Each structure stands twice: as C-alpha cells, then as structure tokens.
Image (spheres, helix red, strand yellow):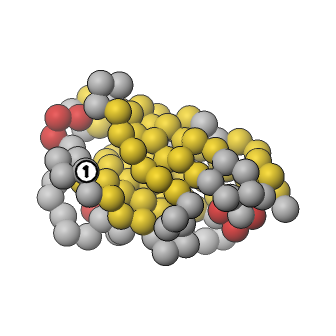
Amino acid sequence: QVQLVESGGGLVQAGGSLRLSCAASGRTFSTFAMGWFRQAPGKEREFVAAMRWNTRNTYYSDSVKGRFTISRDNAKKMVDLQMSSLKPEDTAVYYCAAAGRPTPVLVSTSAYDDWGQGTQVTVSS
C-alpha cells in the first residue's frame, strides 16, 4: 500500500498558477503510474493527468492539456502538478492516486489502488 498526501491547494484568480504536490510513502517501489484527478461539487471524479513511472510517459485530459504539467521527483518521492492559466471551471478538490499494477487505461479511477485525501483548488473569476 502507498500512502499519499497532497498539498499546495488554495484560492487563485483566473489566469493565475498553482503547484500541487503529492508526497508518497510506503510500497512506492511497486508503483506503475501516478495520476491526478479532480472532483467538483455534484460531479464525478475526473481524470486530469498521469505519468507512467518507468517510462515517464505523460497523459493529460483535453481540458488541461497545454496548461497543466505533471512531474516527479524521485529523491523526494513526490509527484507535482503545475497548473497555469487557471480557469474558474478548474475549481475542484484535486486528488493524487497511485496505480500498483500495470494497466493500459490510466484515465479511469479503477486503475488506481491508493488515493490521497485531496486538496481544494478554487479559481475566482
């Protein structure tokens, strides 16, 4: 099992930037991929970005492509999400997730075994 703790959320004006971090501990050596998801009030949790751990291949939802960047720091066992050009529709609770087994579909919540508690991001217009 992998324990995940997110940080870096907050309130920002539209057009601004935020950097979210996810600190991982536990069985991190078996991680296949890391992902970021978000959930707005009254909506389902949706895929934002993911990275395959060995290949560093990255994937983004169409709604954030070109604005968000997922990256990792092996030494610190952290995965970051740099968010730029933020829009009010980016407002949500953002969750970090870890997939411990190979899967071809990283956009689905079912691919991930462990989740953080979430961090709130609010973008004002």
Residue projecting furthest to the right:
125
Front-lying residue, 99 or 56: 56
In the figure, residue 40 lies in which quadrant?
bottom right
Q: Which residue is pictured at 53% across the width and 47% down the height?
A: 82
Circle 1 SS class: loop
Q: Mark 1 points at which residue?
A: 56
| Amino acid bearing label 1 | Arg
Q: Which residue is pictured at 30% across the width and 24% down the height?
A: 75
Residue 25: x and y in percent read: 32, 28
Front-lying residue, 94 or 54: 54
Q: Which residue is pictured at 47% across the width and 62% down the height?
A: 48
Residue 122: x and y in percent read: 73, 52
Is residue 73 shown to the viewer in this render?
yes
Is residue 25 shown to the viewer in this render?
no
Task: Judge whether 4 appears above or below 37 on screen.
Answer: above
In the figure, residue 10 lies in which quadrant?
top right
Task: Give the left or right position of residue 10, taking residue 43 as reference.
Answer: right
Q: Which residue is pictured at 80% across the width and 52% down the height?
A: 13
Residue 12: x and y in percent read: 76, 48
Residue 121: x and y in percent read: 67, 50
Q: Residues within 10 Å of mark 1 (few under 14, many from 20)?
A: few
Q: How many marks?
A: 1
